Amino acid sequence: MEAAQRTISVLGSTGSIGTQTLDVLSRLGPPYQLRWITCNTRWQDLAAQVERFKPYGVAIRDADAYTAFKQATSFSGPILCGEEGLSQAAADPENDVVMSAMVGFSGVVPTMHAIRAGHQVGLANKETLVSAGQIMLPAVEQFGATLLAVDSEHSAILQCMVGERTADIDRFIITASGGPFRTTPAADLERVTAAQALKHPNWSMGAKITIDSATLMNKGFEVMEARWLFDLEPDRIDVIVHPQSIIHSMVEFIDGSVKAQMGVPTMLVPIQYALTFPHRAELDVPRMDLAALGQLTFEPADQDRFPCLRLAYEALREGGSAGCVLNAANEVAVQAFLERKILFTRIPTIIEETLSHMEHLSHPSLDAIVELDQESREFASTLTLRP
Ligand code: NAD
Ligand code: MG
């Protein structure tokens, strides 16, 4: 029997997840048709992807990049611009699957459009759930959309949950590599540089998530993401440091049994699983060799040395608009750190100060979230003027 055709759009196709998604799609072949690809500023990369992968259309967020792309290429398909263009691509009724692989809050509105169109959404853009999980999940239900995790930890949980009932879960154990500063003493963290923070031991990813991995905010975000994706209370989502990144996460059930999903660290597996779910397809990646590895090790996550993890749990317990403020302040602080304006240890204090300054909304609308994101950024930016 021939596989049914599936039409895929990739939002953020020029990024780390986006390029790997196009790679997976080209390996999967003809049943998968590429519809839209999108970028922010890197229009040359987008032009190269157009040549190679022949999408139906493109959407470019940045107005200058849009103009440059139009002038420099002879692409004859539709070319959309701005957040509106991205949202239009996301909502296209021809889409079967939308891969949401933009970085940061920029993913919220386009992802919401894909949800409101009732599409299957492969969600890499975790900031969407961190900022607006409380709004997204009811919309998923209302519009009959499906959210499939692309983050390796949540893909692991999804794989462990096949054949299981939510009622039988006791807790999730999300694994963390510990990042580049896993063994760095607290007193030395103040002096670490952006170049050191960008050297992740196990994963090659975009700059923003790599810094989030160094502060452990990425793990905090993943706790929040798990809470929304699988509807489990924060107190039942634990984090454990596992430096080898072989176990991608675990689910403990009410009878004490624990399932773990394992494999070499590569995003190709969770990306492909989100596209072929609930089935699997062959994939030519290095295979796990436990005898060569010798041992898998575990240690507790240190919330004193890495306060971002604690802040994420606190924001999740507080609920409402706290996640939006947490995310906005983090984006501003991470950018300032990458631009060498602030110290590494200033990232959590900027977030904490922004959280205590901004008003708290217990049931914000999407418009209120968009506004609060902007206001939180403005406030957090004033804090970055102090190193
Ligand atoms: P990246 O920086 O490599 O790519 C980001 C993409 O988003 C690019 O295509 C860029 O053009 C686009 N983009 C950036 N700013 C934009 C804006 N303002 N408007 C519209 N588009 C914009 O990021 P990445 O590492 O691929 O991460 C993407 C998402 O996936 C993030 O949410 C990240 O947390 C998540 N994620 C990434 C990995 C990974 O291995 N890279 C793993 C798990 C989850
Ligand atoms: Mg992850």
Image (cartoon, rainbow, N blue to C red):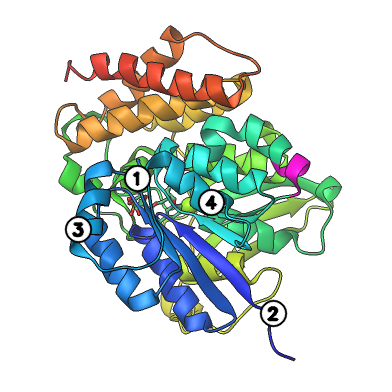
Residue denoted by label 3: 71
Q: Is residue 15 magenta?
A: no
Name the kind of residue labelled 3 in the image: Gln
Q: Earlier in the sequence, mark 1 or mark 2?
A: 2
Residue denoted by label 4: 90
Q: Is residue 320 visible?
A: yes
Name the kind of residue labelled 1 in the image: Arg
Residue at image point 50% right, 8% down: 359
Residue denoted by label 1: 61
Q: Earlier in the sequence, mark 3 or mark 4?
A: 3
Residue at image point 52% right, 23% down: 369
Camera-side residue of 287 and 207: 207
Camera-side residue of 201 and 322: 322
Q: Earlier in the sequence, mark 4 or mark 1?
A: 1
Q: Callout 3: 10 Å neighbours few (<14), some, many (20+)?
A: few
Locate residue 90, reporting x and y percent: 53, 51
Disc assigned to residue 4: 2
Locate residue 62, reporting x and y percent: 29, 43
Q: Is residue 265 visible?
A: no
Per the model, the C-alpha gap separating discs 2 and 4 is: 21 Å
Name the kind of residue labelled 4 in the image: Ala
Name the kind of residue labelled 2 in the image: Ala
**Left or right, 370 with reference to 148:** left
Residue at image point 15% right, 27% down: 341
Q: Secondary structure at mark 1?
A: loop
Mark 2 Cβ and ligand 1 under 8 Å apart: no
Q: Depth-wise, is mark 3 or mark 2 nearer the camera?
A: 3
Q: Earlier in the sequence, mark 1 or mark 3?
A: 1
Residue stretch rendered in magenta on the structure: 140-144
Per the model, the C-alpha gap separating discs 1 and 3 is: 16 Å
The secondary structure making up most of the magenta span is helix
